[in-house]
Image (cartoon, rainbow, N blue to C red):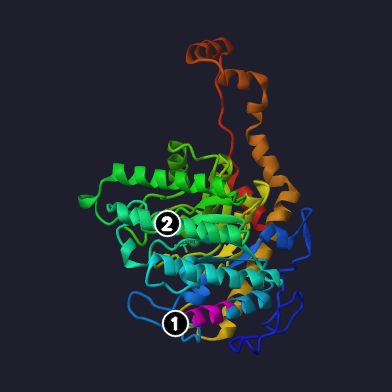
Amino acid sequence: MTEFFADIPKLAYQADATDEFAFRHYNPDEVILGRRMEDHLRFAVCYWHSFAWPGGDPFGGQTFKRPWFGETMDHARLKADTAFEMFRILGVPFFCFHDADVRPEGGSFAETTRNLEEITEYFAAKMEAGGPKLLWGTANLFSNRRFMAGAATNPDPDIFAYAAATVKTCMDTTHRLDGANYVLWGGREGYETLLNTDLRREMEQMGRFLSMVVDYKHKIGFKGTILVEPKPQEPTKHQYDYDVATCYGFLQRFGLEKEVKLNIEQGHAILAGHSFEHELALAASLGVLGSIDMNRNDYQCGWDTDHFPNSVPEVALAYYEILRAGGFTTGGTNFDAKLRRQSLDPEDLILAHAGAMDVCARGLKAAAAMLEDGKLEAARAARYAGWDRPEAQAMLASDLESIAADVEARGLDPQPVSGRQERLENLVNRFF
Ligand code: XUL
Ligand code: CO
C-alpha cells in the first residue's frame, strides 16, 4: 500500500451505485456476444501520462507534485509501487510503458539499460504477484534532445544506431514481461522543414529500421504483435506515419504488411482529418487492425490534447468497427489519456480512468446490440447484393470491351437507389 492512494477503495461494479468510486457499466464478467466484457475491452493504463507527466503545457510548467518525481532508482520504485496500486484499484488487466517513463536515464547507454533491466525485474515480481499484464512496451525516441531531428530518420547515423540499440533493449524488456505487443510511435520521424530534409533517405532509413525490428522479434521468439502508431503531425510539422492509409503503403513498400499491424489512436485520427471509425474500418479492411489508444482531442483547440473518452456514441461507433472485425486478438483499449493540468488530486486520476472505462463499457454494449439487431448489416448487405450474382463477379474478371458489348446487348439503363443515410442514422441512434 502506498500513501498516495491510501484512502481510495478498490472499485467494483454496482449498477445502482450512489458513490463515485464504483463502475456503473463496466462489469468485467458480463458476457457480451459470447465473450467476457473484460476480454473484449482489454483495458490498459498508460504509465506516461499518469505517472511521468508533470502537467506542463506550452505556456507553463509542472502543476503536479508527486512524491515519485525524481531521477533515481528509488523514485522509479516508488513510482512503480504507486502505479501498480492504481492498477489494482481499477482492476485493469493491462498496462503500457515507454522505457523513459519507468527508469532514470543513466550516465551511459549501458547504465541506462541496467536501470531498465532492474525496473523490469521489479515489474515482473509485481506481475507474478497478481498485477496486470503488459499490453505493450515501447521506446521513447522523442523526448531526449538527441532525438530532436528524428530517431530512425535522423541525418546522423550515430543517432540511428542509438535509437536501434534502445529499441533492442525495449523489445528485450517487453519480451521478458511477456508483452502482448510492441509499439513504435515515430514522434520525431518526420520533418520540421523540407529545406533541410532528404525525404528519400529518411523513408528508406525508416523502412530498414522497421525491418530490423521485425527480424529481431523473430530472432528472440517474441510472440506479440509489432504495432506502428499513425499520427499526422505534432511534435513534427509532418510525420511520415500520417494515417492508416499512409502506414499501409509504407508497410507494403518494405514487404512488412503481414508482419506489422497498427495501433490506432482516436485523437490522431482526428488530427489527420478522419473519424476514428474511418481509421478502424480501413485498418480492418486491410487486415492491419491491431490495438487502440482510446483518447480523444478537444475538437476546438486543434492539439493532441489526450482527453479521456466521454462520448458514448463516438466510442460505440469505434467498438462497432472492432466487433465487426472480430474483436481484439493481441490488442486492447489503452487510455493514452491525461488529466487536465488542474486535476491535482489522487482521486482525479482514479475517477478519470473509471469514468472512461464506464463510457467504453456503454459503447461496447451499444455496439454489440447493434450487431445483434442485425438491421445495419442487413442494409449494408442489401446495398451490395447485386455483386453477389455470378455475372457481376464474372465481369470483374473480364475487360472493358466485353463489358461494353454486354451493356449494349442488354440495353442497360441503370437507375440510382437511395443510400438511406438518415434512416440508418436514426437506426443507430436508437442504441445509445
Ligand atoms: C503520442 C502518443 C504516444 C504513443 C506511444 O501522441 O500517442 O504516447 O502512444 O509512444
Ligand atoms: Co498513443
Residue shown at 33% from the left, 61% from the top? 147
Q: Nearer the viewer, residue 9 or 104?
A: 104
| Secondary structure beneath label 1 | loop
Q: Which of 260 and 242 is in front in this view?
A: 260
Circle 1 residues within 10 Å: few <14, some 14–19, many ≥20: few
The quadrant holding residue 89 is bottom right
Q: Which of 260 and 309 is in front in this view?
A: 260
Residue shown at 79% from the left, 59% from the top? 31
| Secondary structure beneath label 2 | helix
Q: Which of 14 and 64 is in front in this view?
A: 64
Which stretch is magenta? Answer: 72-80
Alpha carbon distance from label 2 to label 1: 25 Å
Give the numbered dot on residue 70.
Answer: 1
From the viewer's perspective, is 401 left or right of 223? left
Residue shown at 64% from the left, 40% from the top? 380
Location of residue 144 in the rendering, given as x and y in whole percent from the top left corner? 36, 67
Task: List the residue tagged with mark 2.
Answer: 165
